[in-house]
Amino acid sequence: MTVLLSVLIFSELLIIVAVDYPFTGPIKVEPTALVRVLVDFDSAGANRACIRPLFGPN
């Protein structure tokens, strides 16, 4: 029982460390999608007319 708990805690810590650095390692996420979102947010900030409220009059 103690060994199982130790393995579970170790695997959770390993997953936390692996997810903490998503742009490095053998399985990595390319930053191109993040760059596109940041560019979209920047252009939306310059043009506030494209943002509509979720509730209320349109």
Image (tube, grey):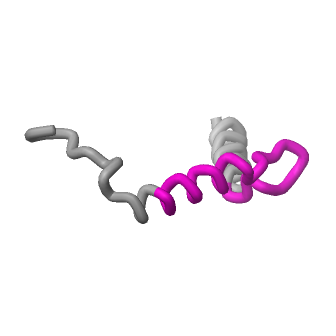
Q: Is residue 3 above or below residue 48?
A: above
Can you name the residue that lies furthest to the right here? 26
Q: Nearer the viewer, residue 34 or 25?
A: 34
Q: Is residue 17 left or right of residue 49?
A: right
Q: Is residue 45 left or right of residue 34?
A: left
Q: Quadrant of the C terminus?
A: top left
Q: Quadrant of residue 44?
A: bottom left
Q: Is residue 54 left or right of residue 57?
A: right
Q: Nearer the viewer, residue 32 or 46?
A: 46
Q: Magenta segment: does it hold 27?
A: yes
Can you name the residue that lies furthest to the left here? 56
Q: Position of residue 19 (x, y in %)?
A: 68, 50
The residue at the point 90 percent across, 46 percent down is 26
Say how many tags the image has: 0
Q: Position of residue 35 (x, y in %)?
A: 66, 56
Q: Position of residue 27 (x, y in %)?
A: 84, 43
Query: Where are the magenta residues, as a range?
Result: 20-43
Q: Is residue 6 visible?
A: no
The residue at the point 66 percent across, 40 percent down is 8
The residue at the point 41 percent across, 63 percent down is 45
Q: Is residue 52 visible?
A: yes
Q: Magenta segment: does it hold 38?
A: yes
Q: Nearer the viewer, residue 25 or 49?
A: 49
Q: Position of residue 49 (x, y in %)?
A: 30, 53
The residue at the point 49 percent across, 59 percent down is 43
Q: Quadrant of residue 20?
A: bottom right
Q: Quadrant of the N terminus?
A: top right
